[in-house]
């Protein structure tokens, strides 16, 4: 078999010829000053950090381009929620500081290979500013679709060369072909429009694993694979590998920290999420972003969510930022359900995690208040305070409480951490041209989503607490969604909506009980090709008012004869003073239960 090897060219790097690292101490804060060089900065950073003696430190990078490789990075086992646990090559392991500041002075950090750039653990105050993160070679495979033959089950493609790395070996495409690492098959694959670099209208996610790949010459490959949905000719497809390996690490992982600010920090590529926060408190991401470098021959920024907040508390603010071309959500805010595995005694319970990417997560600590959820009811029941925690392994944990367990607690019930829930504000952001949802959110505290420009292939805003699969907790109790522009959303092959409220519960739970409550959707401008606007299931208290809806996107209606608004198993829904310009089959659909308390002023005719 012919071996085709394509080695990508790294980004051009302009650096100073020498490295200078100055150390100063002022007001009990140690300051490290770095200057760019053509050398690998990883060992320089490691040596500098090994000599830090203060618990307050500032890292200052003179403006330039800094390159980092994993060869001399710290290798340590890391549990990274919603990613793959394992040995990670960490360039900036920054932990246990009273104060930590990183000033980039608008520098560029270029990483290479399987690298975990920043792990910020157990810090009391963190500020990162004026910094850009990128990779020399992205961990994706991008190809243009030249031809499709559904009858013979093949598609002809022309892979991108020059900026991406891959090889053809034993009738298989192996990528990214960096430092001996390759994904075994294409895996998650999605079609994008070539010019706008956004997911194609009516596109479907596909799990791609061709049975054979042929080299047709002139840079063209033929992939033999029967698909239910083939990508359109002329589109670009992006693949990111197998699901168990395609999330190595986020660009920034922040864990068990507080008082965190990211200001003017941009991630152009990441081997997972852009920004990940676990069990952290008081977080601001402002004037920042996860998006492609302007003019770059790239299609994908982060291979997972742009931002993600797991079991955080305090105030979270995401403001004036830009999130584009990710392969998952713009943001996801949630808690974690753990499953009762065994009741050990009247104060002690053994719990387990339900999803493989939750393993090793710190669910609870001494002093935390915990809710009990007793199947089949989905509501939060009693509360108890944690006395002690004993971790058995990554999956199982024993939790002892200061008071007796509820007498009805049994195997299969759920525990949810009450202490670790945040208020959340997302204001003035642009989120578009990416896979999945703009905003996924699950917290019982105050939520404000305002003045954003939102466009997503799936639902723009999704409320979905889950006692199934992801086990992401968070019954919403106070949410305001106002003054946003929704433009061209829900254009995936499957049905979605601008606002989609849809709990996903396991079979042992009541599928009709009210879940989320007190949601206001108001004063939004909605520009659509003709699709669902609000689709709500099991909500109590939903006000939809003063929204302007225009059917102004010239694209085919994907799911005709669907209502603009649909309500199921819901109470106290009100539609008031909304307007719609365009054609639609019918405005409102509600099941018999929802009709009993539904108020509709008829501003959009039935």
Image: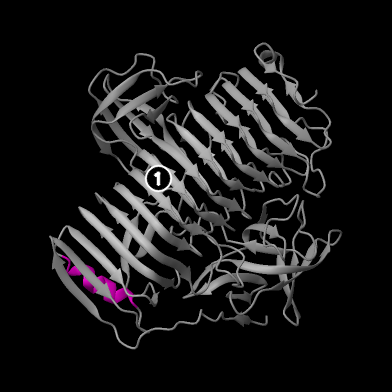
Query: Would residue 312 be visible to someone looking at this image?
Result: no
Could you say where residue 564 lies in the image, as x and y percent from the top left?
Answer: 74, 31
Query: Would residue 519 be visible to someone looking at this image?
Result: yes
Occupied quadrant, residue 160: bottom right
- Residue under the point 44% across and 73% down: 112
Name the outermost residue toward the bottom.
17
Name the outermost residue toward the top.
596
Q: Specify the quadrant that holds the N terminus.
A: bottom right
- 390 left or right of 189? left
Q: Main secondary structure of the magenta part?
A: helix
Q: Which residue is mark 1?
A: 359
Total labels: the figure holds: 1
- Residue under the point 58% across and 51% down: 431
Q: How is the image coloured?
A: one colour
Q: Specify the quadrant that holds the C terminus.
A: top right
Q: Is residue 44 magenta?
A: yes
- Residue under the point 25% across and 73% down: 33
Which is nearer the eye, 320 or 590? 320
Vertical placement of 449 versus 31: above or below? above
Vertical placement of 449 versus 597: above or below? below
The residues colored magenta run 41-52
Occupied quadrant, residue 400: top left
- Residue under the point 40% across and 45% down: 359
Could you say where residue 453 lies in the image, as x and y percent from the top left?
Answer: 60, 48
Which is nearer the eye, 584 or 277? 584
Judge the density around disc 1: few (<14), some (14-19), many (≥20) Cα neighbours within 10 Å. many
Which is nearer the eye, 1 or 238? 238
Could you say where residue 288 lies in the image, as x and y percent from the top left?
Answer: 46, 57
Could you say where residue 573 lies in the image, as x and y percent from the top left?
Answer: 63, 20
């Amino acid at each position: 078999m012919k071996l085709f090897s394509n080695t990508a060219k790294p980004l051009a790097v302009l650096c100073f010829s020498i490295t200078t690292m100055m150390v100063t101490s002022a007001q009990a804060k140690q300051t490290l000053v770095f200057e760019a060089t053509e050398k690998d900065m990883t060992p320089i950073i490691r040596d500098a950090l090994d000599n830090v003696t203060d618990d307050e430190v500032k890292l200052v990078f003179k403006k330039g381009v800094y390159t980092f490789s994993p060869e001399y990075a710290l290798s340590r086992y890391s549990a990274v929620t919603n990613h793959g646990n394992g040995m990670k090559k960490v360039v900036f392991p920054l932990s246990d500081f009273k104060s930590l500041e990183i000033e980039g002075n608008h520098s560029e950090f270029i990483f290479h290979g399987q690298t975990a750039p920043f792990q910020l653990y157990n810090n009391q105050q963190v500020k990162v500013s004026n910094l850009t993160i990128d990779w020399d070679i992205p961990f994706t495979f991008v190809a243009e679709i030249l031809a499709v033959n559904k009858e013979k089950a093949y598609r002809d493609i022309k892979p991108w060369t020059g900026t991406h790395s891959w090889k053809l070996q034993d009738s298989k495409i192996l990528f990214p072909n960096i430092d001996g690492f390759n994904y075994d098959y294409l895996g998650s694959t999605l079609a994008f429009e070539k010019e706008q670099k956004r997911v194609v209208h009516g596109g479907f996610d596909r799990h791609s694993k061709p049975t054979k790949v042929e080299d047709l010459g002139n840079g063209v490959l033929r992939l033999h694979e029967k698909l239910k949905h083939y990508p359109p000719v002329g589109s670009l497809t992006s693949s990111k590998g197998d699901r168990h390996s395609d999330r190595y690490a986020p660009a920034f992982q922040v864990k068990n920290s507080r008082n965190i600010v990211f200001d003017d920090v941009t991630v152009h590529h990441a081997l997972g999420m852009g920004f990940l926060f676990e069990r952290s408190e008081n977080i601001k991401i402002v004037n920042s972003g996860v998006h492609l470098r302007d003019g770059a021959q790239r299609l994908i920024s982060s291979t997972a969510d742009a931002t993600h907040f797991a079991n955080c508390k305090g105030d979270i603010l995401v403001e004036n930022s830009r999130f584009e071309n990710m392969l998952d959500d713009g943001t996801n805010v949630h808690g974690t359900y753990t499953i009762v595995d065994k009741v050990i005694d009247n104060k002690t319970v053994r719990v387990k995690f339900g999803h493989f990417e939750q393993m090793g997560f710190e669910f609870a600590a001494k002093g935390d208040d915990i809710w009990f959820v007793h199947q089949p009811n989905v509501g939060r029941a009693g509360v108890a305070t944690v006395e002690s925690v004993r971790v058995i392994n990554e999956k199982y944990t024993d939790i002892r409480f200061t008071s007796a367990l509820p007498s009805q607690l049994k195997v299969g019930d759920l525990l949810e951490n009450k202490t670790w829930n945040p208020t959340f504000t997302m204001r003035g952001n642009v989120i578009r041209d990416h896979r999945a949802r703009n905003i996924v959110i699950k917290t019982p505290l105050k939520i404000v989503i305002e003045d954003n420009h939102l466009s997503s292939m799936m639902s723009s805003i999704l409320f979905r607490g889950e006692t199934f699969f992801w086990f992401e907790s968070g019954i919403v109790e106070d949410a305001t969604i106002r003054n946003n522009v929704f433009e061209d959303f829900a254009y995936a092959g499957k049905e979605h909506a601008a606002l989609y409220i849809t709990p996903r519960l396991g079979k042992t739970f009541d599928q009709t009980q009210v879940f989320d409550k007190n949601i206001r959707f108001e004063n939004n401008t909605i520009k659509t090709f003709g699709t669902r606007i609000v689709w709500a299931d099991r909500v109590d208290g939903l006000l939809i008012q003063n929204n302007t809806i225009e059917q102004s996107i010239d694209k085919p209606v994907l799911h005709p004869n669907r209502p603009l608004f649909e309500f199921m198993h819901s109470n106290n829904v009100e539609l008031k003073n909304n307007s719609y310009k365009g054609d639609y089959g019918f405005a409102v659909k509600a099941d018999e239960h929802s009709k009993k308390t539904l108020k509709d002023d008829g501003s959009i005719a039935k």
